């Protein structure tokens, strides 16, 4: 199938499929006589796998490692779990950071009168 069909089947934009091919994250199955990239069902499965990995926030390099594990029948689930656990810790750290920001901003919003006067604790805090 051509790149636009592969993109649609995998849920990715054509530009992303082309980028993933250019950086060697996924290889087209071949080229047409006109030189266009051609993708098979296995390529589309890899593209969808990478899309899902990226949705979880795995980096390109982590996705490369995961796709390598995906394609390796002799893989150890411990290796997969290690990558996923690392990503989970990153997400949890980000949640803690966002909670701190949330709490600070919530306090400032509550402290602001929101009237026509110029004094504002939000501006004071930011200044």
Image (tube, rainbow, N blue to C red):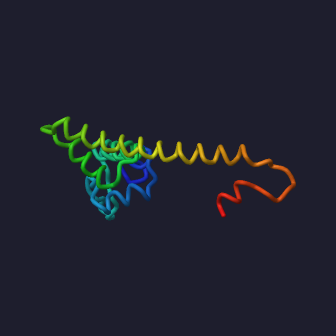
Q: Residue furthest right?
A: 116
Q: Quadrant of the C terminus?
A: bottom right
**Image spot of residue 26 (x, y percent):** 29, 53
User: Considering depth in this image, is 59 or 126 the residue closer to the camera?
Assistant: 126
Side of 11 where 36 appears, left or right: left
Q: Residue at x 24, y 41 (%)?
A: 82
**Image spot of residue 65 (x, y percent):** 24, 49
Determine whether 67 is above or below 31 in the image: above
Q: Residue at x 34, y 61 (%)?
A: 36
Q: Residue at x 72, y 43 (%)?
A: 110
User: Considering depth in this image, is 39 or 91 the residue closer to the camera?
Assistant: 91
Q: Residue furthest top?
A: 77
User: Considering depth in this image, is 116 or 15 the residue closer to the camera?
Assistant: 116
Q: Residue at x 37, y 53 (%)?
A: 2
**Image spot of residue 79 (x, y percent):** 20, 41
User: Considering depth in this image, is 4 or 85 the residue closer to the camera?
Assistant: 85
Determine whether 35 is above or below 6 in the image: below
Q: Work out whether residue 10 can be spotted.
A: no
**Image spot of residue 10 (x, y percent):** 40, 44
Q: Quadrant of residue 92?
A: top left
Give the total number of marks visible in the rendering. 0
């Amino acid at each position: 199938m051509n790149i636009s069909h592969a993109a649609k089947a995998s849920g990715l934009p054509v530009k992303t499929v082309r980028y993933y091919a250019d950086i060697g994250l996924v290889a087209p199955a071949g080229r047409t006589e006109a030189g266009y990239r051609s993708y098979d069902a296995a390529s589309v499965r890899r593209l969808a796998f990478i899309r899902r990995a990226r949705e979880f926030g795995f980096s390109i390099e982590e996705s490369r490692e995961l796709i390598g594990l995906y394609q390796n029948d002799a893989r150890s689930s411990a290796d997969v779990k290690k990558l996923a656990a690392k990503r989970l810790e990153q997400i949890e750290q980000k949640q803690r950071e966002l909670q701190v920001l949330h709490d600070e901003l919530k306090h400032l919003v509550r402290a602001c009168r929101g009237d026509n006067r110029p004094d504002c604790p939000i501006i004071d805090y930011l200044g």
